[in-house]
């Protein structure tokens, strides 16, 4: 039994290929952050190494060691706080890929954040993608396929993980994580279909309080002076050099917020993601036209992409501040 919530179609494709012994040499799992890409990749690693008849089981030592992150043949290559995944990591992977599996049947390499491979690293990875050693399975995880080299993309079987429905997240939180129904309902809505986020928020109160702080800053900026906006851009740019993930989260939250404003403006307020902010959303949507909101969402998405392409963060964020439409001042609102 694959320990994956939802994503039945993708699991079906993988299980079927496994049964027929026709695995692709490399898979690319695409989807938003926390949607379940890593969980699925680890389940695939279990399925490839499991010694039970019904693969993957949860009982055998192979499955258990993979679940505990102790299996010698299953490796995750990720950013670990760096700006990019460098060529050294890929060379090291290639060396390991040339060796026989140590304790299982297959060596599995998971590249987490494949869009952050340096150009050199991606080109180096191509060698393995072109001539993969036997018993080696590559799995690339990425949010944005447009940032991958076309040559890398074309050598992987692409599987897209879409956000889960709210009710699937809600049920999983109640049944598997024993969350109280009311809390599960709110977290499911706030998760935008990304179960991993909701599960993290269950055990870490800080995630929700941090979200509130970030939303408050966003609301303030909508009516702040340009000096204040630029100061915030400088602060974010500074943060970007230390913690890219945090800045990505801030900007994703902004996209979600502005999408909610768009929904309210378009008369679809019952579909908003920020369910706990309904009154505020209605108030904030007031001064803008649909077009202003749409254009700013586009600017946000552009800024996020430019940051991933290593444009100057300060410049990108200042341009973003300039393109943010002006909300009503507190006195007039
Ligand atoms: Zn097993």
Image: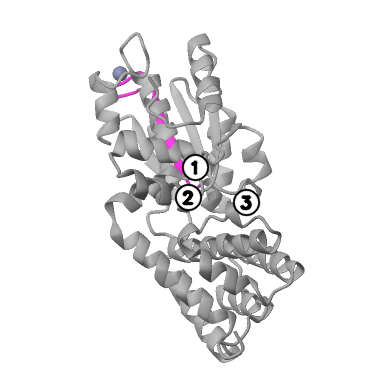
Q: In the rendered image, which residue does mark 3 sit on?
A: 147
| Inter-mark Cα distance, 1 to 3 | 29 Å
Identity of the residue drawn at 56% across and 25% down:
9
Res 51 → quadrant = top left
In this view, the residue in front, 307 or 1, is 1
Spot occupied by residue 267 in the image (x, y as percentages of width and height):
69, 58
- Crowding at dot 2, Cα within 10 Å, few <14 / some 14-19 / many 20+, comes out as many
Q: Can residue 3 be seen in this snapshot?
A: yes
Residue at figure coordinates x 69%, y 64% from the top left: 265
Q: Residue furthest right?
A: 291
Residue 331 position (above or below residue 29) = below
Q: Name which residue lies at 52% across and 46% down.
A: 114
Quadrant showing the N terminus:
top left
Q: Is residue 256 above or below residue 38?
A: below
Q: Secondary structure at mark 2?
A: helix
Label 2 with label 3: CB-CB less than 8 Å: no
Of pointers 2 and 3, the one earlier in the residue sequence: 3
Q: Residue 241: name its quadrant.
A: bottom left
Q: Which mark is residue 166?
A: 1
* Residue 118 falls left or right of residue 34: right
Mark 1 or 3: in front is 1
The mark lying in front, picked from 2 and 3, is 2
Rendering coords of residue 70 (x, y %): 25, 34
Q: Is residue 305 visible?
A: no
Give, as a single range, the part of the protein colored magenta: 101-113
Is disc 3 surrounded by few (<14), some (14 to 19) or many (20+) residues within 10 Å? some
Q: Which mark is residue 189?
A: 2
Label 3 sits on a secondary structure element that is helix
């Amino acid at each position: 039994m694959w320990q994956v919530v939802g994503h039945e179609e993708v699991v079906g494709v993988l299980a079927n290929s496994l049964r027929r012994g026709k695995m692709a040499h490399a898979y690319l799992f695409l989807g938003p952050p926390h949607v379940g890409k890593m969980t699925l990749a680890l389940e695939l690693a279990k399925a490839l190494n499991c010694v039970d008849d019904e693969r993957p089981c949860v009982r055998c030592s192979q499955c258990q060691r993979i679940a505990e992150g102790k299996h010698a043949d299953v490796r995750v290559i990720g950013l670990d706080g760096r700006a990019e995944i460098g060529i050294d990591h890929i060379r090291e992977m290639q060396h390991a890929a040339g060796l026989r599996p140590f304790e299982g049947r297959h060596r599995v390499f998971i590249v987490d954040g494949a869009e952050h491979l340096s150009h050199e690293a991606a080109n180096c990875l191509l060698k393995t993608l072109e001539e993969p050693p036997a018993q080696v399975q590559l799995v690339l995880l990425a949010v944005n396929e447009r940032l991958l080299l076309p040559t890398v993309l074309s050598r992987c079987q692409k599987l897209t993980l879409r956000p889960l429905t709210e009710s699937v997240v809600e049920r999983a939180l109640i049944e598997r994580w024993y969350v109280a129904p009311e809390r599960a309902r709110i977290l499911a809505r706030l998760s935008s279909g990304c179960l991993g986020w909701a599960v993290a928020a269950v055990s870490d109160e800080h995630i929700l309080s941090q979200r509130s702080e970030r939303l408050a800053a966003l609301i303030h900026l909508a009516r702040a002076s340009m000096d204040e906006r630029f100061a915030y851009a400088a602060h974010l740019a500074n943060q970007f050099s230390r913690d890219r993930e945090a800045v990505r989260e801030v900007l994703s939250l902004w996209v979600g917020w502005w999408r909610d404003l768009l929904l309210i403006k378009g008369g679809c307020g019952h579909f908003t993601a920020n369910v706990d902010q309904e009154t505020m959303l209605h108030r904030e949507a007031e001064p803008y036209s649909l077009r202003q909101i749409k254009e700013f969402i586009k600017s946000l998405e552009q800024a996020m992409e430019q940051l991933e392409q290593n444009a100057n963060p300060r410049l990108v964020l200042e341009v973003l501040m300039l393109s943010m439409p002006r909300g009503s001042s507190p006195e007039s609102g």
